[in-house]
Amino acid sequence: MPEMIHRVQRETQTHEPSVAAEAMARTHITHGLSVEPTGSEFVFEERVRGSDLLALESTRSTAVVTGVMEPGSAMMILWMKSGSGHLDDNPLKIGRPVLFRQGPQRFRWIDCTKDVLRIDRAIVEQVAAERGDWAPGPLEFRPRHVPEGPTLAAWWLMVRSVAEEVLRGPDEVPVERERELARFAAGGLLTAIPHWPVGQHEPPVVAATARFARAEAFLLDHATEQITVEDVAEAAGLSVRGVQAAFQRHHGITPTMYLRRIRLLLAREQLEAGDGRSVAEIARATGFAHLGRFAGSYRQEFGELPRQTASTAREDSRV
């Protein structure tokens, strides 16, 4: 029998600030935690599911929450979904992942909804070493880096896959499967945020030098262009078969499918922006040459047609 690991699930719903503070202190290493309701009715909801290797957390509160937080043995990546937030007085953008630094960090959340992904630090360092072709060890990350464009789409592609398994998967899973999923999440983090071994100077473009990382970086850099798997292979110094195998191993899908899903996420973000461009213009801008195939792939991925997304965005902008 394989060794198993238990995914803990904890949910808290309360109207009491003291109970909310206790829940947050149970989930994170905090100091000087303060929860001050901003309205007559205080609401706090927290849902945490996962293991010591990988966990997802969703929180909503109608309060000003302040204090100092430490990530401990995990890498913690946060993204705001509504409200406002600051880390060390730096404002956070809605819908953009931000990495907690590896020491104590001041935070301030105001009437916010946010998600947090936690990944075992040792796993992140091991995956970084394999991708970067260096010895495992502590990492430095570009401070306050916010991914955009194809890199951001790659992040959300990873989060969707991880959330599907962590939130809807079984409570007991083999340790090796949980470790594999944590490695997959680590790859998404390392793709999103430039990094390098502690003690080295920040690299000019990307930290990774291993061939798969070069292949992935090339694909993302040219995601909206008419590139082929042969182009990716040449840029990485791999054979086409080698690229196919590497993407299957790291992402569980072919490079062609990975590229298509990145483009679809880019298109969705632009459709939701409601900037006045037509569906056809956005399809072409994100690398789709055939509008009919784009619409079919989009519906398969998101459950609605591109024009429905655009229509909803227009309606929301009028509210």
Image (cartoon, grey):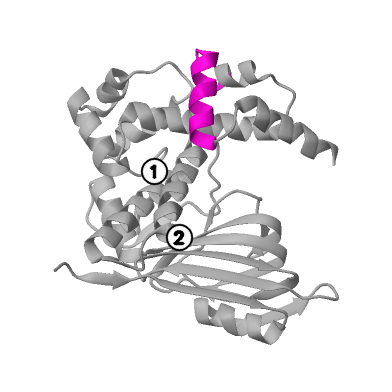
Dominant SS type (magenta): helix
Nearest to N terminus: mark 2 or mark 1 = 2
Question: Quick one: 68 or 295, which is closer to the camera?
Answer: 295
Residue at 66% across, 25% down: 307
* As drawn, 64 above or below 244: below
The residue range painted magenta reads: 285-302
Instruction: Report the label total.
Output: 2
Three-letter amino acid code of the residue under disc 2: Leu
Which residue appears at 40% of the width and 29% of the height? 259
Q: Which residue is mark 1?
A: 203
Q: In the image, is residue 287 part of the stretch drawn in magenta?
A: yes
Q: Quadrant of residue 16?
A: bottom right
Mark 1 falls on what kind of element? loop
Q: How far is disc 2 from disc 1 in space, using C-alphas?
A: 36 Å
Residue position marked by numbered label 2 in the rendering:
167
**Magenta span has 50?**
no
- Residue 45 pos. (x, y %): 64, 71
Q: Amino acid at mark 1?
A: Pro
